[in-house]
Amino acid sequence: MKAKKMFLVMVVVLSMVAVFAVAAHAGGWYTCTVNMAGAGWGTHCYIKLSDTAATPAFENRWFVPLDSQKKEMLATALTAMTNNMNVLVYIDATTQYSIIRAIYLSP
C-alpha cells in the first residue's frame, strides 16, 4: 500500500514538473534586436534575435521564419538592422530554431 502511494506521489510531482517546464518555453510576443539575418542552407532563412527585456528570455538565438512568409520576414529583419530599429516578433518558443510566426518593425 505504501509503495502505491509513493508511486502516485512521484507521478504527480513529475507531471507537474513537465507541465511547468513546457510553460517556461511557451511562445509569445517579444521585442527584440536583430543581430544577424540572411539566407541559409538550402531554401531556409535564419534570423538571430535578442530579447530587449530587462531580464531577457533569450539572447543571440537563431529563429526560422515561417516558410510561407520567409522573404517578407527576412526583408523586415534586414530593414530593422539597417535602420537600427527593434522588431516585435511572435515566436512558437524561445528555444533555438523555433518558428517566427509574425514580425513587425517597432519604433
Image (cartoon, rainbow, N blue to C red):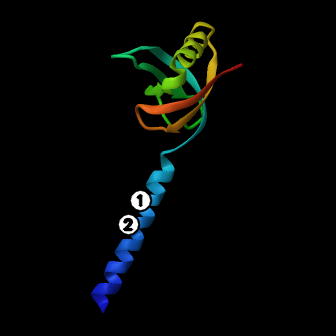
Q: Could you tell me residue 83's position as x and y percent?
A: 63, 8
Image point (38%, 66%), residue name:
14
The tag on residue 14 is 2
Q: Could you tell me residue 95's position as x and y percent?
A: 43, 37
Asked if 35 appears above or below 50 in the picture, the reply is above
Determine whether label 1 and label 2 are within 8 Å by CB: yes
**Residue matched to label 1:** 18
Image point (54%, 35%), residue name:
91
Please, what secondary structure does the residue beneath circle 1 have?
A: helix
Q: Which of 26 and 6 is in front in this view?
A: 26
Please, what secondary structure does the residue beneath circle 2 have?
A: helix
| Farthest-out residue, right | 107
Residue type at mark 2: give it: Leu
| Farthest-out residue, front | 68
Q: Is residue 51 left or right of residue 7?
A: right
- Which quadrant, please, contains the N terminus? bottom left
Residue type at mark 1: give it: Ala
Picture quadrant where residue 33 is located:
top right
Q: Could you tell me residue 20's position as x and y percent?
A: 48, 57
